[in-house]
Amino acid sequence: MPSLKRYTPLQIFMHAAASFPLVRLVFEAFTGGLTANPIQHIEQRTGRAALTLLILALAVTPLNTLFGWSELIKRRRALGLYAFLYACVHVIIFLNLDYGLAWSLIVQTVFEKPYILLGAAAFLLLIPLAVTSFDVWKARLGKRWKYLHMLLYFIVPIATLHYAWGKKGDFFHFSGEVGRPWAYAIVFIMLMILRIPAVRRFFASLRTRLRLPFSINKPQAS
């Protein structure tokens, strides 16, 4: 199809993969597959999708350093906006379906359960990143735009702790259902190590010497 020629394979794959959790939830809703606790099921799925996409957005720069795959940089905004979409659905389900917009009860629950307070903090910090993700704001804010979007370095660990403390178990003592949260935490730590200037320079030079796969720096269609 001619209309598809303007999209790269990476774009098509990224949009399909990012949409999959939502499509799957809709399919499960129509086929009775939302488990015995559908609200919790949707909350957990959308929360994990948001966190996964945030980590993928954070992985763009290290992956570009490792493989020189410059098109990834162009797709980072879409990953962040998809993450914000899932975070919004996650919050709406919590506020509306879970607590019926009973604000006094919601406020009480937020302060009684630290993991919900962490989730609220992560979501509030994510809002300015989503709002300013467009080029017009990048031009207006200048250097401040980069510093603002470094909030992602704090949002991801906060969201990971929110996810971990919401599970049954003890995240810091490696007991209970903490396997997935720890997987997110380990990936985050690795991505931050790859951002250290000395480490980044080492892998950039290694990529040049070894000519690793995907070392393609020519412009891609957007």
Image: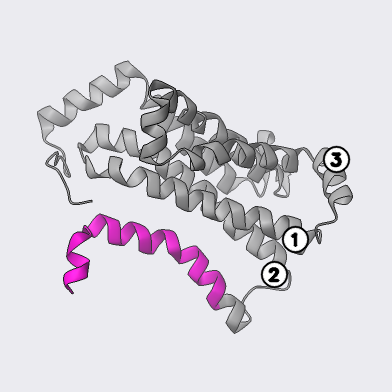
Task: Examine the structure image and report whether residue 20 is included in the region drawn in magenta.
Answer: yes
The residue under label 3 is which amino acid type?
A: Glu
Rendering coords of residue 167 (x, y %):
70, 49
Give the residue pinned by disc 3.
112
Above or below: residue 98 compared with residue 72? below
Above or below: residue 93 compared with residue 173? below
Disc number placed over residue 38 in the picture, else none: 2
Q: Identify the magenta region.
A: 1-27
The residue under label 2 is which amino acid type?
A: Pro
Q: Nearer the viewer, residue 12 or 158?
A: 12
The residue under label 1 is which amino acid type?
A: Asn
First along the sequence among labels 3 and 1: 1
Instruction: Determine the CA span between mark 3 and mark 1.
Output: 19 Å
Q: Residues within 10 Å of mark 3 (few under 14, many from 20)?
A: few
Instruction: Determine the CA span between mark 2 and mark 3.
Output: 24 Å
Give the residue pinned by disc 1.
96
Q: Nearer the viewer, mark 2 or mark 1?
A: 1
| Principal secondary structure, stretch drawn in magenta | helix
Residue contact at pointers 2 and 1, CB within 8 angstroms: no
Q: Nearer the viewer, mark 3 or mark 1?
A: 1
